[in-house]
Image (cartoon, rainbow, N blue to C red):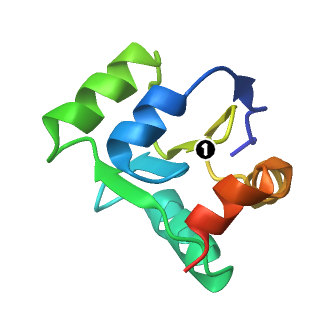
Amino acid sequence: REAIQPYQGDYRSLQAEAGLPVVLLGTAWCGYCRKTREHLSKKGIAFADLDIEKSELAARWHAELGAEGVPVMLIGDREIRGYNPTEVDAALAALKPDRLANALR
């Protein structure tokens, strides 16, 4: 599966509502979501893990973003669709230090 390039936008209100600067919209059964969770956990990153099939809020955000699949990551001002650890790492590196500190476990 080809990785999709990240979108840029202002996701601060969504991240504030989720309580963390790193948000994962996914499902329980998605293998790429599982791999993304593992990648973030290995890096010691705390993230809001929202299931679009179990959370009305997550489903609404997913629809508002126009996303068709999962995972969808919101990190800082970047939206990353699909499993793309390289883009996730770049987005984490681009977070301002105070926001990154909020994401570290």
What residue is at 46 percent from the left and 51 percent from the top? 24
Residue shown at 38% from the left, 51% from the top: 19
Q: Position of residue 29 (x, y in %)?
A: 30, 61
Q: Is residue 25 above or below residue 46?
A: above
Q: Which residue is mark 1?
A: 82
Vertical order, 77 against 43 (above or below): above
Q: Position of residue 90 (x, y in %)?
A: 85, 52
Relative side of 22 to 5, left or right: left
Specify the quadrant of the image occupied by residue 64: top left
Q: How many marks?
A: 1
Residue 8, how many percent across, how many down?
Answer: 72, 23
61 sits left or right of 90 in the view: left
Q: What SS does tag 1 mark?
A: loop
Q: Amino acid at mark 1?
A: Gly
Question: Residue 25: where, in percent of width, then height?
Answer: 41, 45
Residue 58: image quadrant is: top left
Residue pictured at 84% horizontal, 48% vertical: 94
Foreground residue among 39 and 96: 96
In the picture, measured across the screen, residue 67 lies left or right of residue 45, that is left
47 over 26 or under it: above or below: below
